[in-house]
Image (tube, rainbow, N blue to C red):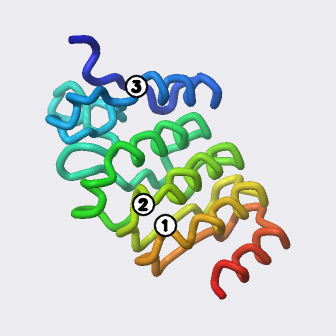
Amino acid sequence: GGVAYCNLLKCRFGVQSAWALAAAAEPAADAAADGGGGKFWTRPPADGACGAPLLCGSPMRTNFYGEGLSDSDAVLIAASLRRTTAQWSLSQKDLNLAANRLSDAGGVALASALEARCVPALRKLYLAANHLADAAGVALCGALHALPELRDLRLDRNSLGDKTILALAAALR
């Protein structure tokens, strides 16, 4: 019983509320039957069905280029990544969050999911043209060890500084 899917991306709630929602929406033990995927939906598809899956389902949605996503959206995406580990291992190899409104809070949330080895097969991570600064940059660089297949990392057009560059240099050693 209960709500199976809920469209919440691009709403006006804050990061703390998104973390609370992500924690409350953790799948129950019997959720493995539906693939253990997240319960967050993006927007109704053209065919008028209930909605298109955020990161769960087939195929998993991973291209969010230029959609105006905020830090609270990044928290929900990170929560979905944590619940779709098995699907990521076998399917999508890229995540495009470029040209959005992500700042340090969103970047740190994503880094946390990445560092938890939720997406070990990830080959491309695009975070260009956001509002990421050194807190997110350092956290993302700290997660690189958990991404052995990563070949393409795009962080251009952010507010990254020396701390991020030093963290990246250390991660690449």
Label number found at residue 95: 2
Q: Residue at x 77, y 76 (%)?
A: 165
Q: Is residue 6 above or below residue 69?
A: above
Q: Which residue is farthest right?
A: 162
Q: Secondary structure at mark 3?
A: loop
Image depth: mark 2 or mark 3 in front: 3
Evaluate if marks 2 and 1 touch, with contact meaning CB atoms under 8 Å apart.
yes
User: Who's the residue at 38% across and 65% down the image?
Assistant: 94
Q: How many marks?
A: 3
**In this rendering, position of residue 111 left or right of residue 35:** right
| Disc 2 secondary structure class | strand
Give residue 38's position: percent from left, percent from top. Answer: 33, 36
> Going by the image, does 145 lie left or right of 25?
right
Residue placed most toward the observer, 118 or 11? 118
Q: Amino acid at mark 2?
A: Leu
Q: Rounded to the nearest whole Å, what is the CA distance between mark 2 and mark 1?
A: 5 Å
| Quadrant position of the N terminus in the picture | top left
At label 2, counting other C-alpha atoms closer than 10 Å, the crowd grade (few under 14, some 14-19, many 20 or more) is some
Real-space Cα separation, disc 2 to disc 3, in angstroms: 22 Å
Taking 4 as reference, is 134 above or below it?
below
Q: CA distance from mark 3 to mark 1?
A: 25 Å
Neighbours of disc 3 within 10 Å: few (<14), some (14-19), many (20+)? some
Q: Is residue 82 left or right of residue 162?
A: left
Task: Identify the residue shown where x is 35% and y is 43%.
Answer: 83
Q: Please tell me which of labels 2 and 3 falls first in the chain.
A: 3
Residue 25 - label: 3
**CB atoms at circles 2 and 3 under 8 Å apart?**
no
Above or below, 88 against 5 in this view is: below
* Disc nearer the start of the sequence (2/1): 2
Q: Which mark is residue 125?
A: 1
Q: Residue furthest bottom?
A: 173
Image location of residue 113, percent across then percent down: 51, 51
